[in-house]
Amino acid sequence: MDKRDFDAVVVGSGPNGLAAAITLQQAGLSVLILEAKDAIGGGLRSAELTLPGFVHDIGSAIHPLAAESPFFKTLPLAEHGLNFLTPPVAAAHPFDTGRAATLVASLADTAHRLGPDEKAYRQLIQPIVRDWPVLAPAILGPLRIPKHPLAMARFGLDAVTSATMLAKRFQTLEARGLWAGMAAHAIQPLTNVTTSAIGLVLMAMGHVRGWPLPEGGAQVIARALASYFVSLGAKSKQMLPLAPSVNCPPPTLYFSTSRRGSCSRLRAIPSRRSTAGN
Ligand SMILES: Cc1cc2nc3c(=O)[nH]c(=O)nc-3n(C[C@H](O)[C@H](O)[C@H](O)COP(=O)(O)OP(=O)(O)OC[C@H]3O[C@@H](n4cnc5c(N)ncnc54)[C@H](O)[C@@H]3O)c2cc1C
């Protein structure tokens, strides 16, 4: 078997690579997924890192965005073993005072527990929760002109600000701490512009869907995606371990999730529709 046996090569088997591979395979192309590690999943990998039988997530653990992903929602992942568990408290931010700020399913309860910041919390998060059905495709989908520009503009005006700037709307330690924990998911200094975006989405997700985790660990999402990929006619041998350097001879299409961009060349999907698999 050779890379040239396939219409398309996807570099990396993280959630984005698996989603790309599924999309291409669904379009009738035969797809080869190349993965440098000895297990698929990328940031979705889990392993017994301590004691036998105790599964730990190596990267991601909590998956509100996977559960809300417009693309994942089109896939029968439950039939391929994915079951989300949603805890009653999405997130808690403890303080040295012995108190904690909590994000729970009820927006009213979460806001009420923030005392003097109840109104500010409602004003910030309620529009995102209300507009989520129309915001989701724009926020979680490919970049395109939004179908609901007013809702998107309302979200965008807050989302583009830095998290430290937005924190000034709150006066209590609890609200500011909870907000900082959300915005920290931007994994960059909170003084940077747009660091509010991920915080707003994650906070709203607490009320839209909760913060679910996959039963069995993050790896179950990767396994369900891989299982569905195989069900489309792909062979499991179409997911290969490979050294991190990939040549780019021309088969048809390369989709790379590699940060090193070893295969960054991307060509248009051919119009040919063939039977999936090889
Ligand atoms: C510590 C940490 C915690 C996180 N927690 C969460 C969380 O709780 N919830 C959440 O939703 N997100 C979380 N994330 C973010 C999430 O993990 C990423 O957004 C997601 O994994 C990105 O998916 P991806 O497919 O783009 O890349 P990755 O998941 O990184 O996958 C890329 C894959 O490509 C492979 N690869 C790279 N280069 C090559 C090459 N040249 N040849 C072959 N293979 C290659 C890699 O081995 C890897 O398997 C967390 C991230 C980190 C770092």
Image (spheres, helix red, strand yellow):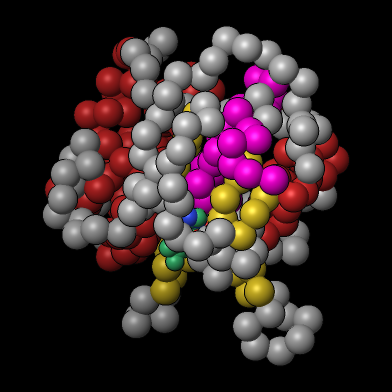
> Which residue is more in the foreground, 167 or 67?
67
| Residue 209 visible somewhere in the drawing | no
> Which residue is more in the foreground, 29 or 182?
29
Q: In the image, residue 80 lies at what x, y percent?
A: 82, 44
Q: Residue at x 82, y 49 (%)?
A: 81
Up the image or down, 131 lies above or below 115; here it is above
Q: Residue at x 50, y 62 (%)?
A: 243
Up the image or down, 127 lies above or below 118; here it is above
Q: Residue at x 68, y 80 (%)?
A: 48
| Residue 231 visible somewhere in the drawing | yes
Q: Which of the 4 quarters of the picture holds residue 22?
A: top right
Q: Which of the 4 quarters of the picture holds residue 198?
A: top left
> Which residue is more in the foreground, 172 or 178?
178
Name the quarter where the N terminus is drawn: top right
Answer left or right for 73 relative to 143. Answer: right
Q: In the image, residue 265 lies at what x, y percent?
A: 37, 34
Queried whether the magenta region covers residue 17, the answer comes back as yes
Q: In the image, residue 127 lies at what x, y percent?
A: 40, 28
Answer left or right for 34 relative to 114. Answer: right
Answer left or right for 230 relative to 204. Answer: right
Residues in magenta, as a range? 1-28
> Which residue is more in the foreground, 149 or 77?
77
Q: Which of the 4 quarters of the picture holds residue 35?
A: bottom right
Name the quarter where the C terminus is drawn: top right
Queried whether the magenta region covers residue 69, the answer comes back as no
Q: Residue furthest right?
A: 79
